[in-house]
Amino acid sequence: MARERERDREDRDNEFVDKLVHINRVAKVVKGGRRFGFAALVVVGDQKGRVGYGHGKAREVPEAIRKATEAAKRGLIRVPLREGRTLHHDVNGRHGAGRVILRAAPAGTGIIAGGPMRAVFETLGVHDVVAKSQGSSNPYNMVRATFDALAHEDSPRQVAARRNIKVSTLQSRRQGVDADAVDA
């Protein structure tokens, strides 16, 4: 029974892709010299709409990365994607002094985003997105601001349920707005 549980956990671990975003080395000065510690920021996702980030600290780099990866797997969020390749709508996010703007993009655009945000989108499974970071360039704040923005991402199904209307009604209104924009 325990062996079967172990195998299930390994299968679950294999479905995730993890990216190391940042490693920070800190030194504590003690009587005998310096003691080094490491902090790691890791982003984990299944490339199908689930993504999480984690932070781990330890004396050795591999241990810090392992702790961060486990923390990221505990804090996964689901993000609705349009056609499995881009966002449904433009969205802003912020954390501390970090501000990000995420925009949906047409097919073939690719991931146009800076380092920490790029890692989030690659693990999330987004193929087409335009993102801009404003304010802080601190990787921790950028990742947290990106997650704040992704948490506010809604699918048409969620919007329709919130408004108590059908998705088809919502979509037809959208096509009407798009047609008006083309005429203008």
Image (cartoon, helix red, strand yellow):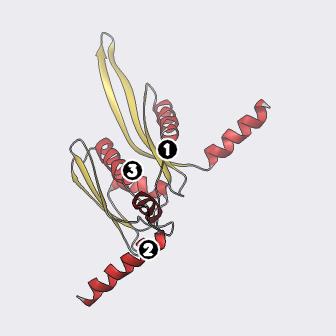
Inspect the image, locate mark 3, and give the three-letter code of the amino acid beneath it. Ala
- The residue positioned 30% from the left and 20% from the top of the image is 28
Residue 151, numbered label? 3
Q: Quadrant of residue 177?
A: bottom left
Residue 43 appears at what percent x and percent y? 45, 46
Q: Secondary structure at mark 1?
A: loop
- At label 3, counting other C-alpha atoms closer than 10 Å, the crowd grade (few under 14, some 14-19, many 20 or more) is some
- At label 2, counting other C-alpha atoms closer than 10 Å, the crowd grade (few under 14, some 14-19, many 20 or more) is few
Using the numbered discs, state the Cα–Cα distance from disc 2 to disc 3 in whole angstroms: 25 Å
Residues 52 and 92: in front is: 92
Residues 121 and 183: in front is: 183
- At label 1, counting other C-alpha atoms closer than 10 Å, the crowd grade (few under 14, some 14-19, many 20 or more) is some
Quadrant for the N terminus, please. Answer: top right
Residues 43 and 154: in front is: 154
Q: Secondary structure at mark 2?
A: helix
Residue 169, numbered label? 2
Vertical relation: 174 (above or below) 179: above
Inspect the image, locate mark 1, and give the three-letter code of the amino acid beneath it. Leu
The answer to whether the residues at label 1 and label 3 have Cβ atoms under 8 Å apart is: no
User: Which residue is denoted by mark 1 in the rendering?
Assistant: 76
Vertical relation: 58 (above or below) 88: above
Residue 182 appears at what percent x and percent y? 29, 87
